Image: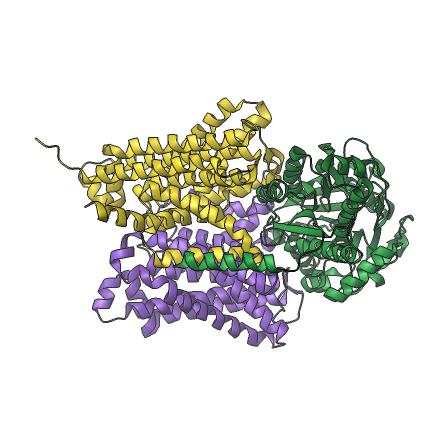
Chain colours: A purple, B yellow, C green
Amino acid sequence: MLAFDLLANGLIYGCFYALMAIGLAMIFGVLKIVNFAHGEFFMIGAYTYVLVALKLGVSPWLALPCAAVSGALLGWLVERLLMRPMYQGYASWGFMKDEYAVVVTFGLSLLLINLVDKIVGPYSFRGPPLIDVSRFALGPIMLTGQKAIAAVVSVLLMIGLALFIKRSVWGKQIQAVAQNRLGASLAGIDATRTTSLIFMISGMLAALSGALLAPLVNPSPDIGAFPAVKSYVIVVLGGMGSIWGAMLAALILGVSEAFFSVYISYDYRDAFGLIILVVVLLFRPQGLFGEKGREL
Amino acid sequence: MKPIHNLWQERLRFDMRAALVIIALIGLLPAVVYGPYALGIILVSVYFAILALGWNLLAGYTGQFSLAPAAFAMIGAYTTALLDHYWQVPLALGIPAAIVVTALFGLMLGKLVLNLSGPYLSLTTLAFAEIARVVIGNSHEFTRGDQGMHVATLTDNRLAYYYIFLFALVVVLACIYWLLKGKLGRFMMAVRDDPVGAESRGINVVRIKMIAFCISCSICGLAGSLYGTFSQLVSPELGLLQQTGLILSMVVIGGMGSLSGAILGGVLIYLGSEWLRGFGDIQMIVFALLVIVFARYIPGGLWGMVAARLQGRRS
Amino acid sequence: MMFRCLRYLAGLMGFAFLLSPAFAADPILIGVSLTQSPPGSVVQGTQVKDGMEILKDMVNAKGGVLGRPIKILYEDNQGIPEKGRAATEKLISSDKVVAMAGGHQSSVCLAEIEVAHRYKVPYVNTNCWSDDVRKRGYPEVFNTSPYNTLVSSSMATTLATMGVKRVVAFAENTDYGIGQAKLTGELLKAKAPQIEYKYETLDRASKDFTAAVLPLRANPPDVIVMSMLPPAAYLLMNQVYEQGVAPTAKTLMYDGGGLADYPDFWQNVKEGGKYLLSFALYHPQMKQTPLASDIAAEYKKRTGGDINRLVLQAADSLELVIQGIESAKSTDSDKLIKAMQTMNFKSIRGVSDFSNKPGFGYQQWLEIPYVNYELTAEKQPIAQTVLIQAPGQKFDASKIVHPAK
């Protein structure tokens, strides 16, 4: 039945979107900045996965952690070199940190796209799938092995992240810094190190989502635009900084896109999410799940 | 009794004078620069300078960090183009129509983001910008989508167009100066620095924000419309997020919260990116590195550096 | 500090250029605006560049044109019409090229021909298929590129001969895609009105078309036509395959975008590419001129890959300019345009003849040779594909292979 097909596919894509967007939601929640280069973390993860698996001949299952590492490394570098001035040194950048973040990450995004384009080449690659089952039927819906595994891995990662934030020491530190940076550092938490950790996790998650989706979207150097805009929509829709909110918003986005594009028009498929966002904000400026809502 | 020194007015006046000097220099360039190609390049940089001024009014002075300036330029350009294409509306009406339409859209956007601030506001404006771009880009039957639309032109003479753009820049600058000189300017900065405090002092924050959005967006729309008539082609690429990023870089590197900074940033960065063509393949990489390095190590922008030296000498 | 360093660097580079070996004679400058960075199709741009470079080197090795070497100046238009316009302006008014060539994306071409028309400089259309480029009727524009009417007529004939009942077409939301899909539908209606045909427009920037494919699962058509370009085309093919809609015993896919001979085709579609029917402008079984064979050999030597039609098209456009200059015995724009209009152009791809019909045929080489073939195995080289319509012959539906189920 068509509606069931659409629902199933929408939910699967929703899981992918959620994984993409969570890293951004974390950075948002803590630093309250827009990361224009978020899509490029996804792209770097996708390329690492594809290159490691194809050029080094390594099994795709091993290429996944390589992508994760590259994402974490990139996140750490970005925080260390570019983001520190924002919160260390109130005098020069204190009141301009939003602008600074946007410009610097815009430059970074441009740099990464063109570096990859020159070094690796402009051709798109189809990432090798994790298992070589190209299609199988799960009840009434058709899936590929890759889609199924990617969805499962995404869900596991999100659960893992939720548990990490809620239960572990580092997770609690992240929560503290998100709620009140100054207060947290007064309580003895190293805010800078925590921020570094957040960037690493964000980079890692974005890179992993890139690696998982590499067999599905055929990455090219400019693939970053696709996860970036979706992530922005999801983060605002879900309510800033709320990770649960982002996850739910992602699922809603995935399903709505599927239904709207079939029943209304394929042409404006990518505009639907944005329109939903604008409509929701008209009635609920704090997003679906609110700032003061459930934060992890 | 001696009039009380108004520090803000002094700084603004200094800023304005510097901006006029820069514009005069640009106006004299055709005496030494030859060829329609070179003139065209400087002309486009003036286009960006106008956009930078418009955005700076909204973000630098009123603190509303919108990510939609390029989208408004696109909306302005398409307004003129659609009117020309479907109803043969002459440019004398088409260009003012662009100003009005973008002012209205600006009001809409302002209303939408009224209760938002910081990154929430930015992302919502981004959503608005993308919606505009996707709708225009995919409405193939109506706007010819990616292929763009042909637009009439004001004149075939490149030099005349050069001075038309420069004139527009002066007009926009004058309007902004007049706006900022009075109470409105200070209210805008109050909204930027401390909206709650401003409200508590009786400033109608809502009204100020709406005015800022309206004017800023219509400036962007005017620039876009003029540019469309110059290149005789409008396409959705005018509204790409990449273009917005470029405008932001120009203002931040030029110096936020100052008129000369915006103009300087616009002109220099665009000319710089053209000069980089000499680097061939790696031109974009070098450009990106320059943007990052400038943003990272030179806070206050170019204007900040220059002004600090000049003003230091005066006192 | 930084600016100073950069200035020194720029100065050094300029100096290095002066020191580079100069030709005895003053080179002929030809301008090429193509895509070398995203968001345009960099794949196409690279192939156009390869084709032109190979021919240029061959010609220069034999002494150049009118005793002068050819130099090609490349500008990156990123696939954006506005940048194409600016690049063309720069090449014509600042670099003073004698002719433009290499345009490969219709929307960019349409912006660039305006500039060429304004400056009255010849512009050779390498690969812009949209009929609108011809319909403008500019005498400066010469079209060696295939055109939508050619492709759509062939596709309509093919579909009519196949004797199918239902056809669904997916078109990208550009003038090329929608133009081709619409035209194919109209021509098909005239040839075989009993065939049910409808087309859907898809956003070429989108990454997921599953929602468009799912409704076809319940009631699959006989043929799915694609009027799309990569990367969206590859994604669509994969997603159609994943949902089990095509290729099946009932349904096959038919490509009108010339995908199969792109160098990155197989690495992107894997098994989804099997049984693809393809309208194509190059097949090893076509009659090749000696120059084409030479270029093919050189291409294989330089890149290790088999030649494809885009490389030949690019070389062909350059060849047109060269022959024009030789015929006019000058590089003056007016003389060059007149020569190109009146001379007998010996194309690399066969016998050519520019028509003068206004409309889609204006200054267009009408009888561009083409074939239709089917891919029958993964990673199949073009030489081994099944020719369903050999060059110059009638379409033979019996040669079509369907998968078992």
Residue A101 to residue B12: above or below: below
Q: Is residue C404 visible?
A: no
In the image, taking residue C180 as reference, residue C395 lies left or right, namely: right
Which of the 4 quarters of the picture holds residue A143?
bottom right
Spot occupied by residue B39 in the image (x, y as percentages of width and height): 51, 38
Residue C104 to residue B222: above or below: below
Spot occupied by residue C304 in the image (x, y as percentages of width and height): 74, 67
Q: Give the residue displayed 29% in from the left and 32% down from the top.
A: B179
Spot occupied by residue B62 in the image (x, y as percentages of width and height): 30, 41
Spot occupied by residue C352 in the image (x, y as percentages of width and height): 86, 43
Q: Give the residue displayed 67% in from the left and 60% down from the top.
A: C242
Viewer-proximal residue, C112 or C372?
A: C112
Quadrant (top left/top right/bottom left/bottom right) for the C terminus of chain C: bottom right
Residue B86 to residue C179: above or below: above
Viewer-proximal residue, C282 or B269?
A: B269
Viewer-proximal residue, C270 or C321?
A: C321
In the image, taking residue B53 as reference, residue C268 lies left or right, namely: right
